[in-house]
Amino acid sequence: MIRTFSLLLFCLALPLTSWAAGEAVAYTSLAITHPAAEETIHDNTGTLTVELALTPALQTERGHRMKLLLDGTAMPVTGTTSLTLAEIDRGAHTLQAAVEDRSGAVLIVSEPVSFYMWRASALFHRH
């Protein structure tokens, strides 16, 4: 009985934020699953759907957000693991993803993925 009472007092003494909300869970993996490495994307509008695998799931309730870098430049993103980029120029590109907290600190970064965007051109002649 005394042991139970002591445990109850200990739990009540814990700060409410760590007891009720729990601690943030560390991310263990982040990978770009689409496009595949060295893949050629055929899209005349330059649209690319990026698929990500993140473990555990994005903790948006803690202010965490995805960041996507195309050739080293941050792209505006909405969404969590399926993101769409538009008007990508033809040619070779590098893509990398990261998770940031609300202060902008990077929590995890994916390996970079190189891909190629193929867009039709009036300069391509069919014979």
Image (spheres, helix red, strand yellow):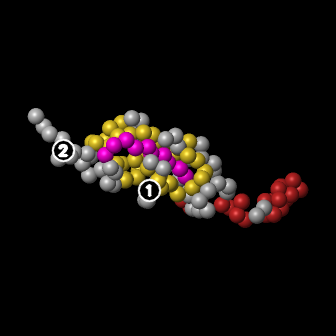
Residue 60 spot, x, y in % from top left: 54, 59
Q: Earlier in the sequence, mark 1 or mark 2?
A: 1
Quarter of image, res 63: bottom right
Visible in this render: residue 52?
A: no
| Horizontal side of residue 1 vs 72, given as left or right | right
Q: CA distance from mark 1 to mark 2?
A: 29 Å
The amino acid type of the residue labelled 1 equals Met
Q: Nearer the viewer, mark 1 or mark 2?
A: 2
Q: Which mark is residue 121?
A: none
**126 sits left or right of 62 in the view:** left
Q: Which mark is residue 75?
A: 1
Which range of residues does the magenta coloring cover?
A: 90-99
User: Left or right of 16: which side holds 83?
Assistant: left
Residue contact between numbered discs 1 and 2, judged by CB atoms under 8 Å = no
* Residue visible at 58% across and 47% down in the picture: 108
Q: Is residue 45 magenta?
A: no
Q: Could you say where residue 32 lies in the image, as x and y percent from the top left?
A: 46, 42
Q: Which mark is residue 123?
A: 2
